[in-house]
Amino acid sequence: QVQLVESGGGLVQAGGSLRLSCAASGSIVRIYEMGWYRQAPGKQRELVATVTSGGSTNYADSVKGRFTISRDNVQNTVYLQMNSLKPEDTAVYYCNADVLRRGPTFLNAWGQGTLVTVSS
């Protein structure tokens, strides 16, 4: 069993900042890529940013220059620093991880989501 637990969401004014965290726990041998996705009301879930175990990052065009993804491989935690937030960033943010579990078996795991609301 693998759990991803997100924290750090909330309400912020446009132009403000938030930092999301996601900690992975359970029968983990290794975590490969970790990432953040988001789903706004009435829209499909979309990629926000990903980071490999080696630190290579990828961002959606809509967040480039404003958001920064990082991870702590010892703590099995991924972060998303969000600056210059806009109302269109309002969404439920989900953590995702490609996990090699004891067994060994491979799992693509999702967190429960954390709500980010940006007021204008």
Image (tube, grey):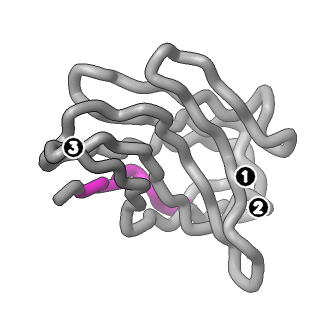
- Residue drawn 47% across the image and 38% down it: 34
User: In the rendered image, which quarter contains the N terminus?
Assistant: bottom left
Give the labeled residue for mark 2: 87
> Mark 2 is on which residue type?
Pro
Magenta-drawn segment? 3-11
Identity of the amino acid at label 3?
Pro
Q: Residue furthest bottom?
A: 42
Q: Quadrant of the C terminus?
A: bottom right
Residue at 33% in and 22% down: 72
Instruction: Check disc 1 and report the residue beneath it.
Output: 14
Return the x and y of residue 3 as percentages of the image width and height: 24, 57
Which element type, helix, strand or loop, lies under badge 2?
helix
Q: Which residue is mark 3?
A: 104
The spot of residue 114 in percent (x, y) is 44, 63
95 in relation to 58, above or below: below
Looking at the image, which residue is at 52% across and 26% down? 52
Q: Secondary structure at mark 3?
A: loop
Left or right of 2 on screen, residue 120: right
Mark 2, other Cα within 10 Å: few <14 / some 14–19 / many ≥20: some
